[in-house]
Amino acid sequence: MDEDISSKVNIAFTCLTCLTPVILDESYRNMDDYAKKGLNLPIYDKNKDYLMPQFRLTDSGFTLISNGKENQSLGTTLKARANLFDSLQSNSEIDHPLCDECTDTMHELMCQQIKVAEGEWNDYNNYLQKLEQTDNSPAIEQLKKELNDLEMEEKRLIDELEKIKQEEVSVKETYKVEKEENEKLLVDEEKYRKEYSKTRRELMHSEDEYHSLKCQVAYANDELKKLKQTNVFNMTFHIWHSGHFGTINTFRLGRLPSAPVDWSEINAAWGQTALLLSALARKVNLTFERYRLVPYGNHSYIEVLENGKELPLYGTGGFRFFWDTKFDAAMVAFLDCLAQFKDEVEKGDKDFCLPYRIDKGKIEDTSTGSSYSIKIQFNSEEQWTKALKFLLTNLKWGLAWVSSQFTDEPITLSDLSESAVSASNI
């Protein structure tokens, strides 16, 4: 071990490819003077920016040789070797020195490149020989012509390319304008879409209102048709019966011992009766002689035209008033007015006839020949109530006739008879 350490080997160079220490052959030490003078050049190279490192093998590894005595003893030899390697680097693309393995690898690589180069050389050489054996004068002229044509085509294509570039610029400008116009149209489209939605909503609302109004008009027309077909007199004055009493608008007209009707109801019934006869007279343009009907609710009365005396169509107390005959006179005057109405209607319609004959304050049932007084004095409640029934029956008969004159479907005499019979059954 000590012998190995004492016999140190000086290493001055490393492989520039793998940095492996390189031990130079002894032949590099025995160079003649000519070689030494030729290689006695500066260690720095003009084209290199580095200094060849110098190493030596020591116990701890490789040690850079300093400028001591050892460097002085080997300076001339190292300088010559360094100059040798620099010369090799300047004449080749390969960095020197190289170790054995890198040299072998480089050798194999260069052999491959030589083979490739030899193959290319053979191809070019064969092609050259083929060209030398062939008369290529016409081909050259043709190639020149083709070249000229290609140059002209190239020029044409270049000109066309310039035109296309100009067109491209114009198209870009047009595209920019169209894009702005498109954005404006999009804004307008959104605006019109909102307006369309609003208009559509208003239209739907209007259509709903139209259909609603149409339904209302149809309903109003139906109601109008019903009203046209409806007789106002029949609706206003409803004459019917309630047990033994004749009624007008549900007010009983009459009085019985078993059913003492209140005088306020009787007076209201007489007010409705006076209003009905007055309305019928106006319809036939009748002006009563001797009397004037004054409908005034439950205090209606009849005015005597000769002296202006008022005859009340209402009572205030018991049944028989021997000392007050005005109520009886008013009822007799009412029968007189009803008879005048009958005479006026018969002038225009000879077939008209009341079911119960009126004769000076009495009403006669022609079917039985019995007559009933309209007065209270010297009369029973039953007969007075019966006379009032016949009175309402005659009014219902006159009401039916007047109603027939103002409807599209006239009422026949048979209809009037049925009405009279139904009223007589009160």
Image (cartoon, rainbow, N blue to C red):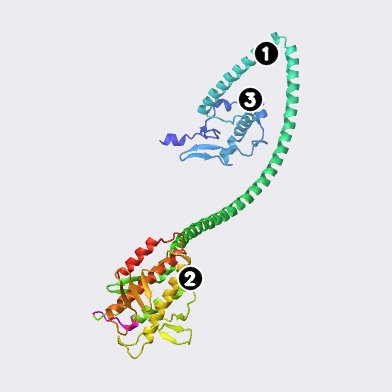
Circle 2: is it few (<14), some (14-19), or many (20+) Cα within 10 Å? Answer: few
Residue 298 can be seen, yes or no: no
What is the three-letter code of the residue carrying label 2?
Answer: Lys
In the rendered view, would you say 52 is above or below 29? below
Q: Position of residue 54 (x, y in %)?
A: 56, 37
Query: Residue sitting at 76 percent across and 15 percent down?
Result: 141
**What is the C-alpha distance between the residues marked 1 and 2?**
142 Å
Tag 3–tag 1 contact (CB < 8 Å): no
The front one of 237 and 219 is: 237
Residue 344 can be seen, yes or no: yes
- Please identify the quarter of the rendering in which residue 382 is found: bottom left
**Is residue 71 left or right of 254 when viewed as pictured?**
right
Give the residue at mark 3. Answer: 32
Please tell me whether mark 2 or mark 3 is closer to you in this view: 2
Q: Position of residue 122 (x, y in %)?
A: 62, 14
The front one of 323 and 28 is: 323
In the rendered view, would you say 187 is above or below 81? below
Give the residue at mark 1. Answer: 128
Q: Which of marks 1 and 2 is nearer the N terminus?
A: 1
Residue 424's disc is none
Query: Residue sitting at 36 percent across and 68 percent down?
Result: 355
Residue with the most extreme front position: 369
Circle 3: is it few (<14), some (14-19), or many (20+) Cα within 10 Å? Answer: few
Which quadrant does the N terminus fall into?
Answer: top left
Question: Is residue 83 rendered magenta in the image?
Answer: no
Q: Which of marks 3 and 1 is nearer the N terminus?
A: 3
What is the three-letter code of the residue carrying label 1?
Answer: Leu
What is the three-letter code of the residue carrying label 3?
Answer: Asp
Look at the numbered disc 2 and give the secondary structure of its residue: helix
Instruction: Please report the bounds of the magenta region as a residue range.
Output: 258-265
